[in-house]
């Protein structure tokens, strides 16, 4: 939904001229205004050049796409998550999935760890995940991360020794086998 090209240029919020924390009503009002101002049929009489027609048509289509994403609560949440993650891209050395993590089970807390280039570890435990709104579940020989909204998400994990960070990608549908225990 979010491409690298759109991050360099403008976000859906920029297209509709609203803040990222704008309410549904603010987004809807701005969308309606953008559609009226950039509708090709309305501006066809005013504009004579094909370059201007292309720009108007492009603005109209961008406003339509922005509304499709921001006008729906679920797609907006996914878009916002992708937007935040793309802004953190420079911080993360790589993306890791639940399957890439090793599991340490001390009985009370499950800890997910991933080895860094410096030989130390990136880690997060079930208690920390719980504070962030995620539940680490163990069912026999598999583990899964559950979040309330069931949307894909990510968490930035710092290395215990160096300055590198990884992004742990959380997908509610993914379960990892526990055969990669420490």
Image (cartoon, helix red, strand yellow):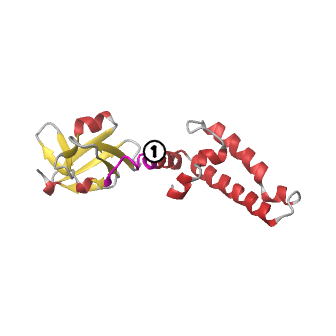
Question: How far from the left and from the top, in percent, is residue 129?
Answer: 28, 39
Residue 122 within the magenta-colored segment of the rendering = no
For residue 180, side relative to residue 51 (left or right):
left
- Total marks shown come to 1
Q: Magenta stretch: give its range.
A: 85-95
Question: How far from the left and from the top, in percent, is residue 33?
Answer: 74, 44
Residue 111's image quarter? top left
Question: SS class of the residue under badge 1?
Answer: helix
Residue 1 appears in view: no
Give the camera-side residue of 180 and 118: 118
Question: How far from the left and from the top, in percent, is residue 117?
Answer: 21, 53
**What residue is rendered at 32% in x and 52% in y?**
93
**What residue is rendered at 23% in x and 39% in y?**
126
Residue 88 within the magenta-colored segment of the rendering = yes
Label 1 sits on residue:
84
- Residue 45, relative to residue 13: is it above or below? below
For residue 1, side relative to residue 22 (left or right):
left
Crowding around mark 1 (Cα neighbors within 10 Å: few <14, some 14 to 19, many 20+) is: few
Residue 19's image quarter? top right
**What residue is rendered at 68% in x and 58% in y?**
61
Residue 96 appears in view: yes
- Residue 9, relative to residue 106: is it above or below? below
């Amino acid at each position: 939904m979010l491409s690298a090209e759109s991050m360099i240029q403008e976000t859906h919020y920029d297209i509709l001229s609203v803040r990222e924390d704008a309410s549904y009503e603010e987004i809807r009002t701005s969308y309606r205004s953008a559609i009226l101002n950039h509708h090709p049929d309305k501006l066809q009489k005013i504009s004579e050049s094909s370059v201007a027609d292309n720009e108007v048509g492009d603005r109209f289509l961008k406003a339509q796409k922005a509304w499709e994403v921001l006008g729906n609560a679920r797609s907006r949440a996914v878009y916002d998550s992708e937007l935040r993650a793309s802004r953190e891209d420079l911080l993360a050395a790589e993306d890791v999935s639940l399957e890439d993590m090793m599991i340490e089970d001390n009985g009370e807390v499950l800890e997910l760890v991933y080895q860094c280039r410096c030989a130390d570890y990136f880690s997060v435990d079930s208690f920390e995940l719980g504070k962030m709104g995620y539940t680490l579940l163990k069912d026999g020989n598999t583990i899964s991360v559950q979040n309330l909204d069931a949307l894909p998400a990510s968490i930035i994990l710092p290395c215990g020794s160096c300055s590198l960070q990884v992004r742990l990608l959380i997908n509610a549908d993914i379960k990892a086998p526990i055969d990669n225990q420490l």
